[in-house]
Image (spheres, rainbow, N blue to C red):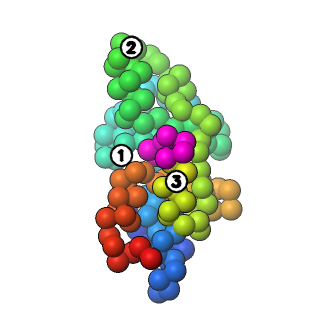
Amino acid sequence: MAKHKTHHYSSSQDSHQDEIGSYMSTPVISVEAATSIQEAVELMDTKNIGSILVKEGEEYVGIVTERDITRQVIAKNMDAKATAVSVIMSAPLHSLEGSQPITEANQFMAENKIRHMAVTENGKVVGMLSVKDLVSFFANPRLRH
């Protein structure tokens, strides 16, 4: 997974540096709703990611995070091999357009009490943004206006 890959939202203009699309992670990693939690965890481990989107057909319907796994699967002693990710996923999927300011993502994530969200382009999911990605922006004073 490429972190902080320059997206087409970014250009030589400084005004694009504070757009969500400049900080999102791509490509989008997902599993089908019927996938076992065990398989999803293994994929997350392989890709070194903290969340994974859940799809039903071509539509993203939710998200599973490391927090979901620890608080629901481990704490409740669920069978990760026999339980589908759809049982523990958070839904609906929260998202913002990649062209919006990164500061809006920060506010949106705080208001919705989420640590991961989808990034869209014309309504289509094209990446993911996490609190960790927000830290990259807020920790760099050169990028703030």
Q: Check contact, mark 3 vs mark 1: CB within 8 A.
A: no
Q: Which mark is residue 76?
A: 2
Quadrant where the C terminus sits is bottom left
Label 2 element class: loop
Amino acid on which the number 1 mark rests in the picture? Ile
Quadrant where the N terminus sits is bottom left
Identify the residue at horizontal 47%, vertical 35% (top origin): 64
- Give the residue at mark 1: 49
Q: Is residue 65 visible?
A: yes
Please name whichever residue, 108 or 47, is drawn nearer the observer in this view of the structure. Answer: 108
Residue 26 vs 113, above or below: the answer is: below
The range drawn in magenta is 110-116
The reply, left or right, for residue 75 in relation to residue 34 is: left
Identify the residue at horizontal 47%, vertical 86% (top origin): 12
- Measured in 3D between alpha carbons, the distance from the residue under mark 2 to the one under mark 1, in whole angstroms, is 23 Å
- Measured in 3D between alpha carbons, the distance from the residue under mark 3 to the one under mark 1, in whole angstroms, is 23 Å
Give the image location of residue 143, x and y in percent: 39, 75
Q: Residues within 10 Å of mark 1 (few under 14, many from 20)?
A: some
Give the image location of residue 106, x and y in percent: 48, 55
